[in-house]
Amino acid sequence: MSRYGFTFPFDGMPLHAHKDALQEAERLGYTDAWSFEIDGVDCFTPLALAGVWTEKLQLGTAIANVYTRSPLTLAMSANAVAEAAPGRFALGLGAGSSVIVGEWNGVPFEQPYRKVRDVAALVRQALAGEKVTADLDTVSVRNMRLSRRLAPPPPIYIAALRGKMLQLAGAQADGAIINWLGANDVPQCVAAAREGARKAGKDPEKLEIVCRIFVCVTEDEALIDFVGRRSIAAYLNVPVYAKFHEWLGRADALRPMWDAWNAGDRKAATAAIPRQAIDDLLVFGNAATCRRKIQAYVDNGVTVPVLNFMPTAPDAAGRAAQSVEMLRALAPR
């Protein structure tokens, strides 16, 4: 594979302590480092630090949320990281979920397809140096412009879960970002994204497919069962992910979990998760087994595998150490 990345910041490791880990990752042959944004740190600050600390790593946001920042704020943040790491940064945009947007931020989670479409278009224009005035379905701006352009505009990727958003990524963006799926689910997503590229008159083979892959290097079956159930319950009961897995064909397998969760019985919901779902959606085992499972994602169409390490130690220092151990164990060289 030509590109091979990881997600950071690592669990348990403060930002200032990442310098050595990022530089080691670069020496080990990793090509990409992608940040994330849930409820800990923002997605741009880690990349600004990485841009200064490293020389070659490609950097990306997966994702910057289109609801919680205005188009100009997104463009300014992207412009800053593009200056810190010229030619090495990609802006990943997405809608997030009703939990993050609506419950945690108090912003109505409405028309996510149109919101992503509109904001991505405006941000691309701003990053290209244009003065933008537009009145779109979900956002209006007047005379929006960046006053500072000291680096090439970064490519834009769109995070997508189902067919329509995947087609938007193919049509409007430089790549699609996919998440929380198994290797055998990848072709369905790739086909939808490439269909969007074809309809837009673009070469579908040039579309990048970035995939966050959840990895735990362990052969402890009881531990992976616990980690898998906890993680799947936390994510796949969120409405956008539930609909995604319905689209992928897992409705019958996951419905007992969804029914128990919606009835307020969290314990029963976790117990109802089929073991096959854990086997499908998480990469685990010894290093050789994990490498083989990661390769399956690439064989099925992922162009940028991004490993999301899942440490299990009870203390922060232990989780940080485990993350670095997995980074080393799964390094491309």
Image: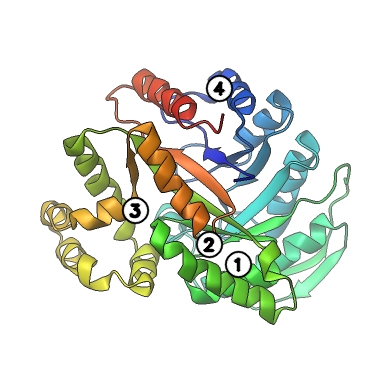
Q: Residue at x 16, y 54 (%)?
A: 266
Residue kind at label 2, given as amino acid type: Ala
Residue 280, percent from left and from top? 31, 55
Depth check: 333 or 237 in front? 333
Depth check: 130 or 324 in front? 324
**What is the number of the mark on residue 281?**
3
* 67 is higher (above) or lower (below) than 317: below
Q: Left or right? Give the position of 224 relative to 6.
A: left
Q: Cα distance, mark 4 to mark 3?
A: 26 Å
* 296 is higher (above) or lower (below) than 130: above
Q: Left or right? Give the position of 316 relative to 210.
A: left
| Crowd rating for badge 2 (residues with CA inside 10 Å; few <14, some 14–19, many 20+) | many
Depth check: 191 or 114 in front? 191
Q: Cα distance, mark 4 to mark 2?
A: 30 Å
Of labels 4 and 2, earlier in sequence is 4
**Residue under circle 2?**
95
Q: Quadrant of residue 199?
A: bottom right
Query: Which colour style is shown?
Result: rainbow
Viewer-side label of 1, 4? 4
Q: Residue furthest bottom?
A: 199
| Crowd rating for badge 1 (residues with CA inside 10 Å; few <14, some 14–19, many 20+) | many
**Residue under circle 1?**
116
Residue kind at label 1, given as amino acid type: Val
Q: Secondary structure at mark 3?
A: helix
**Residue under circle 4?**
21
Of labels 1 and 2, earlier in sequence is 2
Of labels 4 and 3, earlier in sequence is 4
| Crowd rating for badge 4 (residues with CA inside 10 Å; few <14, some 14–19, many 20+) | some
Of labels 3 and 2, earlier in sequence is 2
Residue kind at label 4, given as amino acid type: Ala
Of labels 3 and 1, earlier in sequence is 1
Q: Residue at x 87, y 63 (%)?
A: 131
